Image: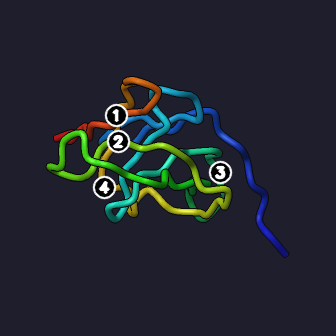
Amino acid sequence: SSSPTASLFHYTCDRFTLSVQGGDNIILCANNILKIEEIQRTVSGTSFVVRQYLQQQPFFTCPMNSVVKEMSRETFVITESDIHCKMVAIPYKNKIVLYPLNHL
């Protein structure tokens, strides 16, 4: 049998707050830029249903290519331990420029 799942609007850990809404829903995970679509809480912990940004291009290249154009259609699930950092999205000329927030 499967354990019950609750959908969360936001999730706070010791490093940052994440949400399904813009401003708190973009993360970096293994050099992939991901958008949080859903946050799920089960008895075994919290997981995040995400989609990956595709077609990354340089606006600046350190620490990674930072301009994105489109989203993947497929979703997949990650856990908090998979998340490297939270990202900030800044609209720029019909594109999105992303910048990592490296929390201490």
Disc 3: which residue: 40
Badge 3 element: strand
Q: Amino acid at mark 4?
A: His
Quadrant in the rendering for residue 92:
top left
Q: Is residue 18 above or below residue 90?
A: below
Residue 87 in the image: state x and y as whole percent: 34, 39
Task: Tell me which numbered mark, 3 or 2, is placed earlier along the sequence.
Answer: 3
Task: List the residue tagged with mark 4.
Answer: 84
Q: Earlier in the sequence, mark 2 or mark 1?
A: 2
Asked if residue 14 shows in the view, the reply is no
C-alpha span from label 2 to label 1: 5 Å
User: In the rendering, at what x and y percent does residue 32 appear?
Assistant: 39, 59
Q: Which residue is mark 2?
A: 67
The CA span between labels 3 and 2 is 28 Å
Question: CA gap, disc 1 to disc 3?
Answer: 27 Å
Residue 97: mark: 1
Quick one: label 1, few (<14), some, or many (20+) residues within 10 Å?
many
Q: Does any portion of residue 78 appear in the rendered image?
A: yes
Query: Is 48 positioned to the left or the right of 95 in the image?
Result: right
